[in-house]
Image (cartoon, rainbow, N blue to C red):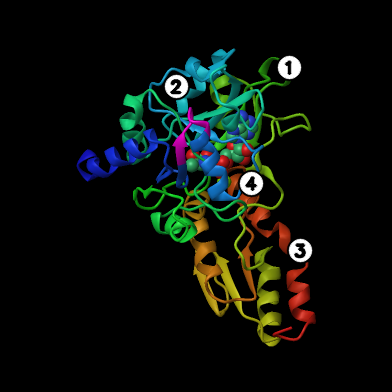
């Protein structure tokens, strides 16, 4: 694995981060837009580049073995157990923040999100940055509310023109394909563990380590922008339908002269554009964001998605699809009842 790493590019990226620049890098979930977590001006530059509200906290990425107590305080035993079980990997833990965390990282909250990614390029970058003792604040490397990037080219498509990103490290396609699972442990004693964002690591897998099943978020749970109703959205409207309804809709929209870009996993009639994804949760998640971006570029009136099963291991995929479709309620009805071009 190590032979494939471009060490000179990774070292250059680490130096750029140390100097306060923004660097995009691959992780196993999605690409991140990184800055030195201890440099408030650099973190502010992430918000500016993304067009993201200032009060949304960012995840701090750590090298394997980095001491949690430098970043967090009142760390429960459960956090150490989860780090031991799932790091490096697609799990973010929300903990009480340590005094030295800049407000810009925590969005003014009294917590910090920590994660140790498993992508070899991310690990090499985190080890090269400040000798492995730093933290890289990184949201997904996309404009606020848009689809997260799973290829270096997606990042260039988002930020290439505006000069805000000093370097994009290329690590190929992100293997997991949807963002990390976020579990809040900052209120463990009073509220137990809370699942703020579903992902590849399931609530059940977390429960197997800490003997408590993470609950759904309550009103007082820490805010997470990835949990906004509308998020992860392409520019083309998105609608999700079960397989049977979808077949009828495809025929109706074809008759009405509408262009459909289709994302599906069972046999479907031909459309203007279509991508068939694997019928497994991991395979579907891996391909989902690239598919949404590709279908967004087809000049279609709507992106129709065949609704996946709703059982446990599909939770992360369903969560992202629901948010991608949130702003498009009524789109199919509208397309059937208006003249094309209207
Ligand atoms: O897989 C991932 O988590 C990717 C890669 C790059 O690591 N990152 C990512 O970052 O998805 P972002 O910023 O797009 O989403 C992180 C989510 C946001 O919804 C943010 O509000 C939440 O994590 N978050 C971060 N710190 C938090 C905190 N202290 N309290 C509550 N939520 C937090
Ligand atoms: Mg994001």
Q: Earlier in the sequence, mark 2 or mark 1?
A: 2
Q: Is residue 303 above or below residue 159?
A: below
- The residue wearing badge 1 is 190
Q: Which mark, by number, is residue 218?
A: none
Label 1 to label 3, Cα distance in Å? 37 Å
State the residue in front, 268 or 49.
49
Where residue 14 sits, quadrant-wise, is top left
Residue at 56% across, 47% down: 48
Q: Is residue 316 above or below residue 93?
A: below
- The residue wearing badge 3 is 329
Q: Secondary structure at mark 3?
A: loop
Q: Quadrant of the N terminus?
A: top left
Residue at 60% across, 62% down: 234
Residue at 56% across, 17% down: 98
Residue 251: percent from left, percent from top: 67, 81
Residue 170: percent from left, percent from top: 34, 50
Label 4 to label 2, Cα distance in Å? 27 Å
Q: Is residue 220 magenta?
A: no
State the residue in front, 265 or 171.
171
| Residues shaded magenta | 34-40
Q: How busy is the neighbourhood of tag 4: few (under 14 within 10 Å), some, or many (20 plus)?
A: few
- The residue wearing badge 2 is 84
Q: Is residue 183 visible?
A: no
- The residue wearing badge 4 is 311
């Amino acid at each position: 694995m190590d032979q494939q790493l471009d060490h000179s590019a990774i070292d250059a990226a680490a130096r750029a981060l140390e100097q306060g620049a923004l660097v995009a890098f691959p992780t196993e979930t999605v690409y991140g837009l990184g800055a030195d977590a201890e440099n408030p001006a650099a973190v502010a530059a992430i918000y500016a580049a993304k067009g993201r509200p200032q009060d949304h906290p960012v995840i701090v990425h750590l090298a394997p073995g980095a001491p949690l107590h430098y970043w967090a305080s009142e760390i429960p035993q459960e956090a150490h157990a989860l780090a031991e079980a799932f790091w490096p990997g697609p799990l973010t833990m929300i903990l009480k923040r340590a005094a030295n965390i800049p407000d810009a990282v925590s969005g003014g909250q009294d917590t910090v999100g920590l994660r140790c990614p498993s992508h070899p390029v991310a690990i090499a970058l985190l080890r090269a940055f400040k000798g492995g003792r730093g933290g890289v604040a990184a949201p997904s490397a996309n404009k606020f509310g848009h689809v997260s990037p799973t290829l270096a080219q997606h990042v260039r498509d988002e930020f290439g023109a505006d000069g805000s990103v000093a370097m994009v490290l290329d690590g190929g396609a992100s293997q997991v394909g949807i963002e990390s699972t976020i579990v809040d442990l900052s209120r463990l004693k009073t509220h137990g563990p809370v699942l703020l964002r579903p992902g590849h690591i399931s609530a059940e897998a977390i429960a197997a380590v800490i003997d408590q099943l993470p609950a759904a978020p309550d009103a007082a749970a820490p805010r997470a922008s990835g949990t906004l109703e509308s998020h992860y959205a392409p520019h083309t409207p998105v609608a999700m339908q079960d397989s049977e309804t979808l077949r009828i809709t495809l025929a109706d929209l074809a008759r009405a002269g509408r262009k459909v870009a289709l994302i599906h996993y069972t046999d479907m009639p031909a459309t203007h554009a279509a991508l068939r994804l694997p019928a497994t949760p991991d395979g579907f998640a891996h391909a989902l964001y690239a598919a949404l971006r590709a279908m967004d570029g087809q000049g279609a009136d709507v992106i129709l998605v065949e609704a996946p099963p709703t059982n446990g291991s599909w939770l992360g995929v369903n969560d992202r699809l629901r948010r991608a479709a949130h702003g498009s309620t009524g789109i199919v009805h509208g397309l059937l009842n208006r003249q094309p071009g209207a």
